[in-house]
Amino acid sequence: MGNIHCTIGIIVYNEAENIGRLLQALEQQELEQVVIDRIIVVSSACHDGTDDIVREKMNHNERIELITEAERHGKSAAINKFLAVAKSEILIIESGDTIPAKDTIEKLVSVFADEKLGASGGRPVPENKRSGIVGHLVHILWEMHHLMALESPKLGEMIAFRNLVKSIPSHSAVDEASIEAIILDQGYKLVYVSDAVVYNKGPEKLDEYISQRRRIASGHLWLRENQRYEVASQDSGLLFRIMKKQFEHKPGEWFYLILAMKIEILCRFLGWWDLKILKKNPFKWDIAASSKNIKREI
């Protein structure tokens, strides 16, 4: 079996604190069947030194490229800049505030030996301390995401897909879900690669957590209206089954689980209010500052 070639797109807005370490983690990936052709950073009006760090990396690695936007138009618009120039058979979108494990690219891409597969997603693992209200909320959220994706693939934080997507709606606030919709519409299937780990960090402040979940809820409503697609988490029956599994997994955290669900209901209402009543589409969102200082060792 021949090698599978991929190009990685990293979408950044003021990620100076993490971009150097992220690029280093990608350079040090343990690869066997997979070849990384290019690593393209799309920088949206960064003003914190992100671009300088990327250019320094470019001096030592010819595979790294930089595309700059003078004005920030949102993550989905930046992804379209990447899609316009990426040529490999498999494309990867990774958030600029994450760090992949050493074998994540190999595991995420090697599954495309299956010709019926259109997209794959890894497992986001938060490095937040499991303490306090927000720390528990973040861990419960991503653990439920994992349990849900095992039943019905739901991709996020890092997604690989066949080079069949020419563009995504620039006003989508949920870019991974928009890619899911396009891939499925072309007759391909999705797969969740649970051992392809990508480390992230959730907000440490409750107001940032609520703002993030509110934006995503609004984005999923917009997706349903504009792309006629619903992600797995919109299935209330599946959601309650996953909630039951989470309780069985961590019965001692019942208080935080109930709190998490109550906050999620609130955020979904607020997301509906934003989109339907206020006519706001948060495709260009405020950054959760406390989620940016990832300390994961490479």
Image: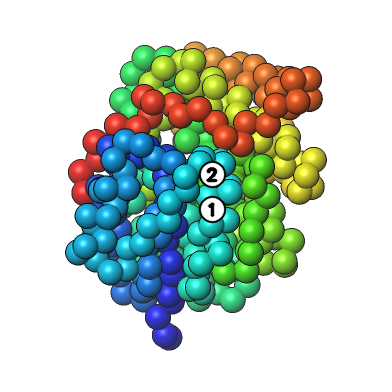
- In terms of image quadrants, where is residue 269? top right
Circle 2 Cα neighbour tier, 10 Å, few/some/many (<14 / 14–19 / ≥20): many
Scheme by which the image is coloured: rainbow
Question: Which of 12 and 72 lies nearest the eye of the viewer?
Answer: 72
Identify the residue shown where x is 48% and y is 55%: 93
Q: Position of residue 240 (x, y in %)?
A: 65, 30
Q: Residue at x 50, y 73 (%)?
A: 87
Are discs 2 and 1 less than 8 Å apart at CB? yes
Q: Whole-percent x and y of residue 154?
A: 58, 47
Task: State whether residue 37 is above or below residue 68.
Answer: below
Identify the secondary structure beneath mark 2. Answer: helix
Q: Which residue is mark 2?
A: 75
Q: Nearer the viewer, residue 153 or 118?
A: 118
Q: Tell me: residue 82, above or below residue 247.
A: below
User: Can you name the residue that lies furthest to the bottom here?
Assistant: 1
- The image shows residue 162, relative to residue 80, as above or below, that is below
How far apart, in angstroms, are the residues tagged by discs 2 and 1? Answer: 6 Å
The relative height of residue 44 versus residue 262 in the rendered view (above or below) is below
Residue type of the residue flagged with mark 2 = Lys
Residue plotted at (62% across, 31% down): 282
Q: Position of residue 274 (x, y in %)?
A: 70, 22
- The answer to whether residue 45 is left or right of residue 199 is right
Residue type at numbered disc 1: Ile
The N terminus lies in quadrant? bottom left
220 with respect to 81 (left or right)? right
Q: Which residue is mark 1?
A: 79
Residue 223 visible? The answer is: yes
Disc assigned to residue 161: none
- Front one among 209 and 87: 87
